[in-house]
Amino acid sequence: MLCQNCEKRTATTFIKKTINGKTTQWHLCAECAAKQGFDSMFNGVGFDLGDFWGSLFAEPSARSITDAVRCKGCGHSFREIAESGKAGCPTCYTTFYDRLLPSIQRIHGKTGHTGKVPNSGGIQLKNERELDRLRKELTDCIAAQQYEKCASLRDRIHEIEKEENPEQ
Amino acid sequence: MYNKSAKWYQKSGTQGDVVISTRVRLARNLSSVPFPAGLSAERRNEVTQRTREALKESDRAGDYDFLEMENMETRDALSMVERHLISPEFSKCDKGSAMLLKKDESVSVMINEEDHLRIQVMRPGLDLDEAYKIADEIDTLLDEKLKFAFDDRLGYLTQCPSNLGTGMRASIMLHLPALHERGAIQQLANTVSKLGLTIRGLYGEGSKPEGAIYQLSNQVTLGISEQAAIENLKGIAAQIIREERAGREQLRRNPRFEDMVWRSLGLLQTARLLSHDEFMTLISNLRVGVALGIVEGISLDTLSGLISDAQPATIMAAARKDMEPAQRDVERASMVRSRLTRTGELS
């Protein structure tokens, strides 16, 4: 079978990706697979993200995407971001969220942020994350039978829940 | 730029036989301002001033020096790279880029590198929790005034998508002579990459390992909390440290190895010319000899300070003048001799 990208060399690599429930399959030669970052994904060396991101959008479907939409924050088009592998400003991520998401997922394996939330990011989100963390810790503590710690965790959870819904 | 007061890197820390230092770096950006690459020098300057003001209004301001890159001598900037205070890319930055540097050099904030802010905390030895705690505090403090760009789904927004999420890169610098000797690093690199980590040479991306010093850091920043990434790194580090120590025990039983340690010390104590490469090889041999207790009377602290101070640009920064490599070799040999002979008698 010929490589689906260059249509010249024999395909030796089979890539199946499922992003947000949509599955695509590719048969690629070693060279095209390498360009897509699929050699280094398994050995972790020589990984140039700019190339990786850029080549991802060099797929035929992406080449046809027009430059009509531009980011309000910096004027970058999607193509400019894809070619450089870098966003122009924070607003680029909101403007092109749907189109950037697949590559972001390819880079990190996941898409939802679960880390620190700044105070300016909204107290509600901060509380939600904190509750998630505390509940997880509570489950671990129960399993480890550390009951004293469990009690203090429970208190902290109730405190935050009360903050969230003061009328209860 | 180079003063003689006590610095964090002149000490060794927890697991100091294998772990030289820990670094935590946070990438942060101001919302509604384009990333530095797309800014004019004037607008970069605005970012710099806003950051400076944000710190000024806190009670921490007195701990930091404010340094503008356009006023910095090249050798001073390169010396900062050697001391891991700034990135190689940042050392080339000019007008509109600046840094905040804590007086003991354990914290630096690069302003207008790839992102508006890169907050960086360094600790001797293995100390990820403390390094993150300090970085987290500075981040929270600066965010109060600066309001960093953040998205519920993507976390902290950064120029490069590889830093989205926590924006955190946590690294530990490891001295791995036994694993290096055994040729085990490539295999290690393969293994850690499957776990979302990466292992590279001393000065990060694309650098070659000098003196068997490697950097282990997290790669994935989205979908994983800071704490989880740090726990992950700690777990892998513990395994690497165990392997390295086992490897060293094997080396210890080899008479050729003991001989190499002593010969290295002999050369370091007597040489009149020491090139950087030769120095790194010899000091690496000596370091493992000291860590194993083969050589006594020399501390890991002394060696940590020496590894940092004997780097090419740092030698020139301390002398406040540029030098040819041959001149530096004389200077380096002299510095090494004086620091390694004060420490007591040889058996």
Image: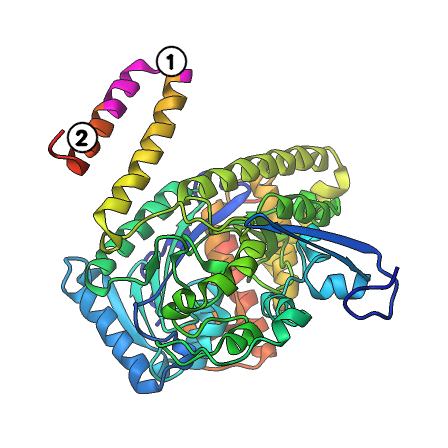
Amino acid beneath label 2? Glu
Boundaries of the magenta span: A143-154
Q: Which chain carries label 2?
A: A
Please tell me whether mark 1 or mark 2 is closer to you in this view. Answer: 2
- Disc 2 target residue: A159
Which residue does the image show at 14% across and 57% down from the upper left? B59
Tell whether position B225 is magenta. no
**In the image, is A80 to the left or to the right of B68?**
right
Is B344 or B164 nearer to us in this picture?
A: B164
Q: Which percent across, then down, holds residue B188?
A: 68, 45
Quadrant of the drawing holding the N terminus of chain B:
bottom left
Is A27 or B106 nearer to us in this picture?
A: A27
Q: Indicate whether B303 appears above or below B114.
A: above
- Is the C-beta separation of discs 1 and 2 under 8 Å? no
Name the disc covering residue A145, or none: 1
Q: Residues within 10 Å of mark 1 (few under 14, many from 20)?
A: few
Secondary structure, mark 1, is loop
**In the image, is A137 to the left or to the right of B54?**
right
Q: Which percent across, then down, holds residue B296?
A: 54, 40
Q: Indicate whether B14 appears above or below A80.
A: above
Amino acid beneath label 1? Gln
Secondary structure, mark 2, is helix
Which residue does the image show at 28% across and 52% down from the upper left? A118
Quadrant of the drawing holding the C terminus of chain B:
top right
Whichever of labels 1 and 2 marks the residue nearer the N terminus, that label is 1
Q: Which percent across, then down, holds residue B21?
A: 47, 49
